[in-house]
Image (cartoon, helix red, strand yellow):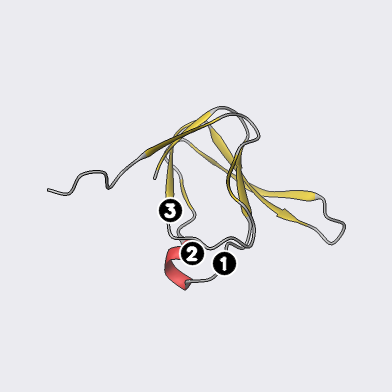
C-alpha cells in the first residue's frame, strides 16, 4: 500500500495555498476552515471569486487542463487542507 499519498497542510489566515499563474499539480480538500479563490483585476486589486468550505475541493482544474493556475487560493481563516 502506498504511503504519503495524502498530506495535510495547515494555514493561518491570509496564507496562500497557491498563486495565480503558478503551475499546478495538486488538488485540495478543505478539512477545516475556509479558502477564498481570488483573482487580480486590471487595477491589481484582489477580487474574491468564491469560497470553499469544509468538505469542498479546489485546485483540480490544473490537474485536468495542465494549465497554470487561473486564480489564487488563500485562507480566510486558520484552515487545514488534505493534499
> Disc 2 versus disc 1: distance between alpha carbons?
7 Å
Camera-nearest residue between 52 and 72? 72
> Disc 1 versus disc 3: distance between alpha carbons?
13 Å
Looking at the image, is 30 positioned above or below residue 58? above
Q: Mark 1: few, some, or many residues within 10 Å (few <14, many ≥20)? A: some
Q: Quadrant of the C terminus?
A: top left
Side of 21 where 31 appears, left or right: left
Q: Mark 3: few, some, or many residues within 10 Å (few <14, many ≥20)? A: some
Residue located beneath label 2 in the image: 62
Looking at the image, is 66 positioned above or below residue 58? below
Looking at the rendered structure, the secondary structure element under dot 3 is loop
Q: Residue 33 at what x, y percent from top left? A: 52, 30
| Contact (Cβ within 8 Å) of mark 2 with mark 1 | yes
Looking at the image, is 20 positioned above or below residue 12? below
Instruction: Classify residue 41 by image quadrant.
Output: bottom right
Residue located beneath label 3 in the image: 27
> Disc 2 versus disc 3: distance between alpha carbons?
8 Å
Q: Residue 65 at what x, y percent from top left? A: 47, 72
Looking at the rendered structure, the secondary structure element under dot 1 is loop
Instruction: Classify residue 35 by image quadrant.
Output: top right
| Contact (Cβ within 8 Å) of mark 1 with mark 3 | no
Q: Earlier in the sequence, mark 2 or mark 1?
A: 2
Q: Earlier in the sequence, mark 1 or mark 3?
A: 3
Residue located beneath label 1 in the image: 68
Query: What residue is rendered at 65% in x and 34% in y?
Result: 14
Q: Which mark is residue 44?
A: none
Query: What residue is rendered at 20% in x and 44% in y?
Result: 3
Looking at the image, is 40 positioned above or below residue 82? below
| Contact (Cβ within 8 Å) of mark 2 with mark 3 | yes
Query: What residue is rendered at 62% in x and 63% in y?
Result: 70
Q: Mark 2: few, some, or many residues within 10 Å (few <14, many ≥20)? A: some
Q: Earlier in the sequence, mark 2 or mark 3?
A: 3
Amino acid at each position: 500500500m502506498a504511503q504519503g499519498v495524502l498530506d495535510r497542510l495547515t494555514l493561518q489566515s491570509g496564507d496562500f495555498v497557491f498563486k495565480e499563474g503558478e503551475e499546478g499539480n495538486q488538488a485540495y480538500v478543505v478539512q477545516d476552515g475556509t479558502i477564498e479563490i481570488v483573482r487580480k483585476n486590471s487595477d491589481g486589486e484582489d477580487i474574491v471569486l468564491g469560497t470553499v468550505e469544509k468538505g469542498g475541493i479546489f485546485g483540480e482544474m490544473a490537474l485536468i487542463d495542465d494549465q497554470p493556475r487561473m486564480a489564487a487560493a488563500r485562507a480566510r481563516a486558520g484552515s487545514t487542507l488534505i493534499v
